[in-house]
Amino acid sequence: MKKVDAIFCADLHLRPDRPIARTDNYQKAQFVALDFILDLQYKHECPIFCAGDFGNQPLNIGWPTWFSAKVIEHLNNFERPVRDIFVCLGQHDLPQHRLEAWPESGLGVLAAAEVIQLIGIKERKYIIIDNYCVHAFPYGTTLEQINVKEKSVALVHMMVIKDKPLWPGQQALTARAILEKYPGYDLIISGDNHQSFVETVDGRHLVNCGSMMRMRADQMDHEPAVFLWYAELNKIRRIALPIRPAEEVLTRLHIDKKEEKNERMTAYVESLKAKYEVGLSYTDNLDAYFQNNITRKNVKEKVWECVLN
């Protein structure tokens, strides 16, 4: 392989709090992962491109002053000279999910501090580096074909699935369908889906990077990674991020408690069904209640007055 031209990642979801499913020091863990990516950049002397959701929440709760300072400190480490970090905005980066509100977000602070650069906004729709061009399509915009002479990359924040829906009824394009629909791109990098996968059609690739961190109990098997790109050959290389065993950092105890609560609620509803007929008639059920419960006459009269008038 020749030199690395770019590092691609997505869904870092940097946050000052700890996800409910994590049991470890999440702050430390996320900055270990971030520093690993930055060390890769320092090693290969190439830009980083993030396909959205760099942060987890856009406003004060997601980017309090101390957290903004901590992120800037890591991105601007004097031992690692600052190199270009380009971000395509995702919904978690945007106040009220509005693209035009990005200056009010935590990423607006990072951009003002010049530790990241935003692409896909009206000030900069794309960027040309050496012999390739990266077009960015943030959340709320539509991926479109753009014809240029350079080798073309699309950086997009939209839900892309490998082959089957993530939940019943989900409407999303498959990676193969997108590659076939947009043949002008040599490489498409997508964010939003926290799974990690690669699809290839006729030597062209779609890379869904997946999330940098395991934040949910259903990510027990997720293996976070970033991807190196060799532009001349249009080759990609997966680099796994350092992680601890899932059983050491993730729990589903909160899910078990919720399921127990749901079971108790179901049992309670079933017990009510044994006493009252649950049907479409509200008045019949109300009448049944009064027949089985001692209620003052004036109260019953008032209730019927409200229901029937």
Image: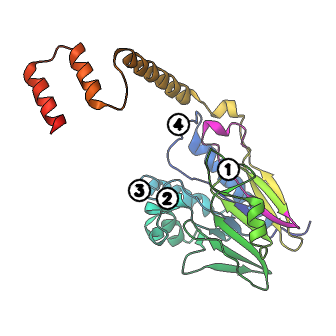
Q: Is residue 51 left or right of residue 307?
A: right
Look at mark 3 in the image and give the residue it sits on. Answer: 60
User: Which residue occupies the foreground of this view, 165 or 2?
Assistant: 165
Camera-near label (3 vs 1) is 3
Side (left or right) of 283 relative to 99: left
Q: Is residue 81 visible?
A: no
Image coordinates of residue 127 in percent, x first then y, are 67, 79
Earlier sequence position, callout 2 versus callout 3: 3
Range shown magenta: 201-222
Q: Secondary structure at mark 1?
A: helix
Which residue occupies the foreground of this view, 146 or 14?
146
* Circle 3 SS class: loop
Q: CA distance from mark 2 to mark 1?
A: 17 Å
Comparing 256 with 183, the one in front is 183
- Dot 4 or dot 2, earlier in sequence: 4
Quarter of the image with the N terminus in it: bottom right
Residue linked to disc 4: 20
Neighbor class of circle 4 (other Cα within 10 Å; few <14, some 14-19, many 20+) is some
Q: Amino acid at mark 4?
A: Ile
* Residue that label 2 marks: 68
- Residue 133, compared with residue 229, is above or below; it is below
- Inspect the image, locate mark 3, and give the three-letter code of the amino acid beneath it: Asn
Q: CA distance from mark 4 to mark 3?
A: 20 Å
Rendered image: mark on residue 33: 1
Q: Are marks 1 and 4 in contact (CB under 8 Å)?
A: no
Identify which residue is drawn at 61% across, 71% down. Answer: 142
Circle 2: residue type? Ser
Can you tell which of label 1 and label 4 is closer to the viewer?
4
Q: For this view, does 286 lie left or right of residue 85?
A: left
